[in-house]
Image: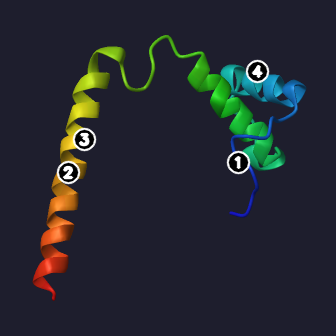
């Protein structure tokens, strides 16, 4: 995959809306017919219109704390391995 600015370059809004309509109304569509920026634009639109985010607000702090602790553990293990390797 060799695209500059994937998810940064806006796709054609008319094509994004057409794709949205097709996906909502039928199973007869071919994603290969669409430019990558139209596809990513449609995906961003889908995520924006979700009633609740993929990571619910009530889980955000729990996941953030867990990730922070995991990163600390990984850094500690990496330090131990580099020290032990010397």
Q: Residue at 22% across / 33% down in the picture?
A: 65
- Per the image, label 3 sits on a secondary structure element best described as helix
Residue 78 x/y as whole percent = 21, 68
Q: Which residue is mark 2?
A: 72
Q: Is residue 35 above or below residue 75?
A: above
Residue 54 x/y as whole percent = 43, 26
Marks 3 and 2 close (CB-CB < 8 Å): yes
The N terminus: image quadrant: bottom right
74 displayed left or right of 36: left
Q: Which residue is mark 3?
A: 68
Earlier in the chain: of badge 2 and badge 4, it is 4
The C terminus: image quadrant: bottom left
Distance from label 3 to label 4 (Cα)? 40 Å
Q: Which mark is residue 21?
A: 4
Judged by depth in the image, the label closer to the viewer, 4 or 1, is: 1
Q: Is residue 1 above or below residue 45?
A: below
Q: Residue at 22% across / 60% down in the picture?
A: 75
Distance from label 2 to label 1 (Cα)? 31 Å
Marks 4 and 1 close (CB-CB < 8 Å): no
Q: Which residue is mark 1?
A: 6
Distance from label 3 to label 2 (Cα)? 6 Å
């Amino acid at each position: 995959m060799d695209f500059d600015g994937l998810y940064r370059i806006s796709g054609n809004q008319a094509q994004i809306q057409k794709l949205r309509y097709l996906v909502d109304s039928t199973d007869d569509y071919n994603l290969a017919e669409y430019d990558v920026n139209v596809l990513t634009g449609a995906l961003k639109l889908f995520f924006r219109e979700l009633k609740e985010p993929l990571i619910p607000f009530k889980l955000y702090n729990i996941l953030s704390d867990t990730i922070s602790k995991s990163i600390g553990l990984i850094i500690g293990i990496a330090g131990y391995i580099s020290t032990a390797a010397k």
